[in-house]
Amino acid sequence: MSYTSFRFATFLLVSLLVYYAVPDRWKERWVLILSLAFYCTWSYPYTILLGLSVLVFWQAGLRMESAARDERKFRILRNAVLFQLLLLFSFKFMQGSSQWGWAKWVMPLGLSYYTFKLIGYAAEVYYKRCPAEKSFVSLANYAAFFPQIVSGPIQRAGDFLAQTKSKIKADPDRLAAGLRLILFGLFKKLVVADTLGSHVDQFLGGSLRHAGTTGVFATYFIPLQIYADFSGLTDMARGTAKLFGIDSPVNFKQPFYAASIPEFWKRWHMTLTSWLTDHLFIPLNLSLRSWGSFGLYASVSANMVLIGLWHGLTWNFLAFGAFHALLLSASILTRNARARLLKKLPGLKIFRNILAPIWTFHLVTVSFVIFRVDSLAVLLKVWNNLKEAAVSCCQTVDLRYFVTTNIESGFGFNLQEFIKLSVSLILMETIHAFQNEGSRGERWFYSAPTAARWVFYIILGFFIIFFGNYDDSRFVYSFF
């Protein structure tokens, strides 16, 4: 059951009516029933796997809290974590091996996400940052919460569990905020991501010989499609959770405006980056501090390679992680030299503020092309098309030739489609300006007259109805 389907809309409406009608003591149980029902619509056999994981960590939390010795607490934590990681990487391996023909495995929905949530919960109990959860239902709710099970955000256990214990009443402002997020997410997914994705699929699935400048556009569509798809899904997840009284953490903060690769990772998939920083990078860096700078580079590289392999045990995800590890290491290595240069030549800051985000976006685009392709041959064809298109543009500056021969050639991408996509991207960036907490755009949006906001909502609704792509409701990050 996809978030973009009418089936889900009906499911959500009925769920909310019952949720606000039942007594407070039944709300948690009702949400768990909803989460399990939602999970079963994707893959009911794997519901047993989800329940087993919750049972292991529920018991581990209780046993750690009652353990008298630190050594015993650590063994309990280690065993629970190893169990869950073995489960995760077994499915990752079998999924990657399905191309060999001897196994056809489907990744359990949300396995990566509830793995991180449960391991994070166990670590918080071990370090006494939150008490062990006594209620199996509450912990199961945390792991299986249906708005977050598909692809996060990865909410901290203490934050989520504290909210589920409070008495939630119907709040018009909270409901309006949730519906607004769902509207924003639907626009990003159906209008922007799926439209861009259709062109990217045709571009990468074709011979690429006819691509020309259209292929250049499609190459730059790749990071935009992945972002619109993932952030749109996150908006819908956060909006749906808000309808049930749960505030979820922000997962994106205009990452393509980042002025450096380290800043990009502070803005992209923020809950995953934060989780890995706390549970992998910091412990590893502390253990390798005697290695000096090499230990820092090793910690960064391990962190990024793991992020790559988390998506799947294939060459392109490994290359994606390794490429970002190289970029982050280079950024750290040159940080002091760049700071000294800017101190000597302060006038360069103006150019840096303009050029750094552009340069960073191009590096990110290169990485997401690697992320998106499924073979080295396709990757080489993409790079070759970029080279040939650059040579062609240098040789021909006739605008009419550029439009008719380049934009209007290849896989249904024409001038009308270009204009529609341009307006859609402008609207998406307007949404981001409104969503950026503490920004001038957010203050302007909420201080604007109600009628002006409704005009914006109606415009988004118009685009969703008339320009939404309903052919494929799958999300890029659904089965990572």
Image: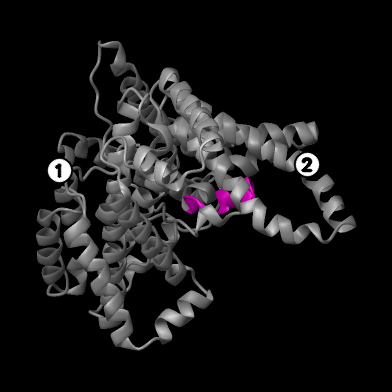
Please identify the quarter of the rendering in which residue 286 is found.
top right
Q: Mark 1 highlights which residue?
A: 40
Q: Residue at x 48, y 68 (%)?
A: 436
Between residue 281 and residue 437, name the one nearer to us.
Answer: 437
What crowding class fits label 1: few (fewer than 14 Cα within 10 Å), some (14-19), or many (20 or more)? some
Q: Residue at x 13, y 64 (%)?
A: 15
Rendered position, 243 above or below 94: below
Do labels 1 and 2 touch, CB within 8 Å?
A: no
Please identify the quarter of the rendering in which residue 197 is found.
top left
> What amino acid does circle 2 point to?
Thr
The mark nearer the N terminus, 1 or 2, is 1
Rendered position, 189 above or below 176: above
Magenta stretch containing residue 186, yes or no? Answer: no
Residue 95, image x and y in percent? Answer: 31, 23
Q: Mark 2 highlights which residue?
A: 334
Residue 156, image x and y in percent? Answer: 44, 56
Residue 102, image x and y in percent? Answer: 25, 10
Res. 139 visible in picture: no
Horizontally, is 63 left or right of 73 in the view?
Answer: left
> What amino acid does circle 1 point to?
Cys
Q: Residue at x 54, y 51 (%)?
A: 274
Which span of residues is magenta-colored? 260-270
What crowding class fits label 2: few (fewer than 14 Cα within 10 Å), some (14-19), or many (20 or more)? few
Dot in front, 1 or 2: 2
